[in-house]
Image: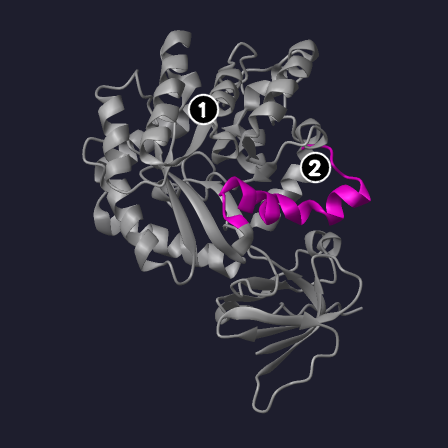
């Protein structure tokens, strides 16, 4: 297959991409088509590596309104509703919803997904289903499963054993939730335990870290220290870190030294963080988003996630990562031209680093032929005009396609 006339990651010059046996075999200008080779005209549109969903909860996706709607839109009512909805979970229910959600993501150019799955469940039902679907869907999407102790490790009955059992059952990543533990001591112990399990089983780490407006929630410093001292470094991710929004600047200045030394990744979830944080404020109201700009300026990797897709905590969403970036740029006040045009990295290369995908990710000769073609000449236009993903190829095979809607003005 020969894909002609595309702009690879913002490049001004048009290039052609040849795919042979599922890999990028040649990239250059004016490539000659071989006899009988399929040719696709990219039309000067933007070619990107596939979108990476760094943080989502597929086990709860597509449950908004079941058994009732979240009328307040708050985290707390969402937790109550999910507690009710969990009573009716079955394998078939989870399987059907996740398959549908993954197809939605695929239509929007997503080929890599890290999903957190609640393992504060003695049956580990959702984890079992997600591990099965990870294998079933692997030709279309690469799924990483995080063992997520939603109700705590030390603060939930048998939480430590359940977390380790989840890893034995096939989870790829160890999770934790220090700000939800009963005490500061439990929070620190939970992080030590999670990192210890990662070392024992050779797993990655992704922690729901300080997802609260409390400036005294400082699980991040413990997690970064453990990443540094254990040598796990960029195998560790701190998700959310909303409390960092409320830290005083003197403390943050000191903290950045440790963050740089630790090498850890960060995930912000703009759609949901801006929705759920600041709920106890009158005015002024905090955005509650972590310090994305400052983290980037200090050489720290940050990617974006959708977090929730049409569930009790966020009753909207189609799995479109461009919606996530659009909100992130606004709420982080990253509205300069260079910020916007380069923001695709939050859901491509930066996300690939978070998921530890390695050198096999990206449009490079010899790599697996995984790419998307977006209907715009650059990412600025893509965001501003809500461009669609025209094609998504995985290992050279088409897994999703779209035709832009035709619009007319009659005056």
Q: What element carries label 2?
A: helix
Give the position of the C terminus as an image quadrant: bottom right
When asked about the image quadrant of residue 285, the answer is top right
Instruction: In the rendered view, tell whether residue 56 sits above or below residue 46.
Output: above
For image coordinates 59% across by 35% down, the residue present is 270
When asked about the image quadrant of residue 69, the answer is top left
Coordinates of residue 217 in the picture (x, y in percent): 51, 13
Which segment is the magenta one? 332-358
| Distance between mark 2 and mark 1 Cα atoms | 36 Å
Give whichever of 107, 80 is nearer the camera.
Answer: 107
For image coordinates 53% across by 9% down, the residue present is 216
**Which residue position holds label 1?**
230
Q: Which circle's residue, 2 or 1, is located before the other in the chain? A: 1
- Can you see residue 148? yes
Instruction: In the rendered view, tell whether residue 50 sits above or below residue 229.
Output: below
Residue 231 belongs to the span the image colors magenta = no
For image coordinates 51% across by 63% down, the residue present is 368
Give the position of the N terminus as an image quadrant: bottom right
Give whichever of 95, 68 is nearer the camera.
Answer: 95
- Can you see residue 183? no
- For this view, does 302 lie left or right of residue 135? right
**Which residue position holds label 2?**
330
- For this view, does 318 lie left or right of residue 325? left
Instruction: In the rendered view, tell whether residue 366 sits above or below residue 130.
Output: below
Q: What element carries label 1?
A: helix
- For this view, does 165 lie left or right of residue 299? left
For image coordinates 59% across by 91% down, the residue present is 35
């Amino acid at each position: 297959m020969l894909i002609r006339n595309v702009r690879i990651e913002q490049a001004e010059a048009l290039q052609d991409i040849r795919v042979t046996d599922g890999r990028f075999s040649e990239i250059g200008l004016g490539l000659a088509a071989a006899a009988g080779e399929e040719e696709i005209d990219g039309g000067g549109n933007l070619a990107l590596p596939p979108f990476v969903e760094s943080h989502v909860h597929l086990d709860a996706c597509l449950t908004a309104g079941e058994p009732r709607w979240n009328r307040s839109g708050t985290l707390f009512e969402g937790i109550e509703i999910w507690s009710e909805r969990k009573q009716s979970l079955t394998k078939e229910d989870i399987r059907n919803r996740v398959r549908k959600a993954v197809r939605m993501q695929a239509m929007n150019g997503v080929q890599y997904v890290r999903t957190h799955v609640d393992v504060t469940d003695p049956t580990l039902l959702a984890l079992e289903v997600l591990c099965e679907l990870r294998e079933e869907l692997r030709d279309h999407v690469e799924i990483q499963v995080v063992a997520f102790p939603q109700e705590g490790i030390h603060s939930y009955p048998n939480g430590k054993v359940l977390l380790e059992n989840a890893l034995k059952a096939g989870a790829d990543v160890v999770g934790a939730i220090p700000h939800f533990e009963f005490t500061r001591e439990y929070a620190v112990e939970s992080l030590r335990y999670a990192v210890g399990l990662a070392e024992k089983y050779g797993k990655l780490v992704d922690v729901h870290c300080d997802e609260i407006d409390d400036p005294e929630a400082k699980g991040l410093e413990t997690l970064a220290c453990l990443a540094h001292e254990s040598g796990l470094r960029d195998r560790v991710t701190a998700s959310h870190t909303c409390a960092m929004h409320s830290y005083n600047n003197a403390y943050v200045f000191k903290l950045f030294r440790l963050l740089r030394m630790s090498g850890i990744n960060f995930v912000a979830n703009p759609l949901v963080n801006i929705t759920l944080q600041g709920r106890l404020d009158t005015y002024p109201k905090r955005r509650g988003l972590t310090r994305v700009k400052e983290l980037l300026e200090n050489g720290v990797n940050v990617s974006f996630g959708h977090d929730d897709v049409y569930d009790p905590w966020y009753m909207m969403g189609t799995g479109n990562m461009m919606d996530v970036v659009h909100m992130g740029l606004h709420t982080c006040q990253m509205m300069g031209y260079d910020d916007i045009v380069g923001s695709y990295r939050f859901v491509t290369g930066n996300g690939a680093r978070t998921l530890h995908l390695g050198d096999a990710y990206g449009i490079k000769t010899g790599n697996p032929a995984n790419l998307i073609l977006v209907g715009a000449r650059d990412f600025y236009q893509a965001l501003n005009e809500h461009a669609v993903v025209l094609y998504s190829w995985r290992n050279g095979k088409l897994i999703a396609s779209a035709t832009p809607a035709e619009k007319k003005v009659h005056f």
